[in-house]
Amino acid sequence: CRLLVKDEEIIREVQRGQTKLFEELVRKYYEKIYRYCYYHISNEHSALDITQEVFMKIYENIEIYENKGKFQNYLYVIAGNACKDYFKKKKIYSLEEVPEFGNENTILETENKILVQQALESLTMEEREIIILRYYQDLKYKDISQITGASISRLEYYLNKSIKKLREYMERE
């Protein structure tokens, strides 16, 4: 089996019955989608569950997938909808657990992480989405525009507004 580089090639082969190749897409994007979900919901276990749901949903519907842009952007749209569904079910948005990045965290680092997470939670869902895609996922405006459906000028407006809100929140705390 030759090495498939482009997502479109992999998807085409999966659609033709080479379902084992789907694992390449999972390996390529799993960590990004997990981090995206985690930044939205602040709960490691729920983020893992949602990430799994996203890949299962895509796998189950791969036959009808149409290439209309970057596959990565399609993943973010599916993941964003899954996160929204999570909140509809929970009807809450709270800091459920402190983000953990190893045992060597000091109390100060943990407090800063909590403060940043709380500041993110103070934003609207749309503002938070743009901040996460731009700064945590490091996506370009063009890609964020495709994912959110917002114009680039609107994204710039929301990004500036969101950064201002985050600064104000951090200064108050």
Image: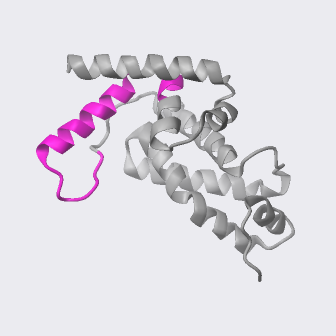
> At which x and y percent is residue 17?
84, 71
Residue occupying the point 56% across, 22% down: 156
Name the side, left or right, on which 140 lies relative to 97.
right
Q: Quarter of the image containing the N terminus?
A: bottom right
> At which x and y percent is residue 130?
53, 30
The answer to whether residue 78 is above or below residue 88 is: below
Quarter residue 113 falls in: top left
- Residue 116 lies in the magenta stretch: yes
Q: Which segment is the magenta one?
A: 99-128
Look at the image and tell me whether residue 161 can be seen. Answer: yes
Residue occupying the point 31% across, 21% down: 167
Front position in the image: 130 or 88? 130
> At which x and y percent is residue 116?
30, 33
Residue occupying the point 57% across, 35% down: 85
> At which x and y percent is residue 37?
49, 44
Q: Quarter of the image containing the C terminus?
A: top left
- Residue 162 lies in the magenta stretch: no
Residue occupying the point 72% across, 67% down: 5
What secondary structure prevails in the magenta region? helix
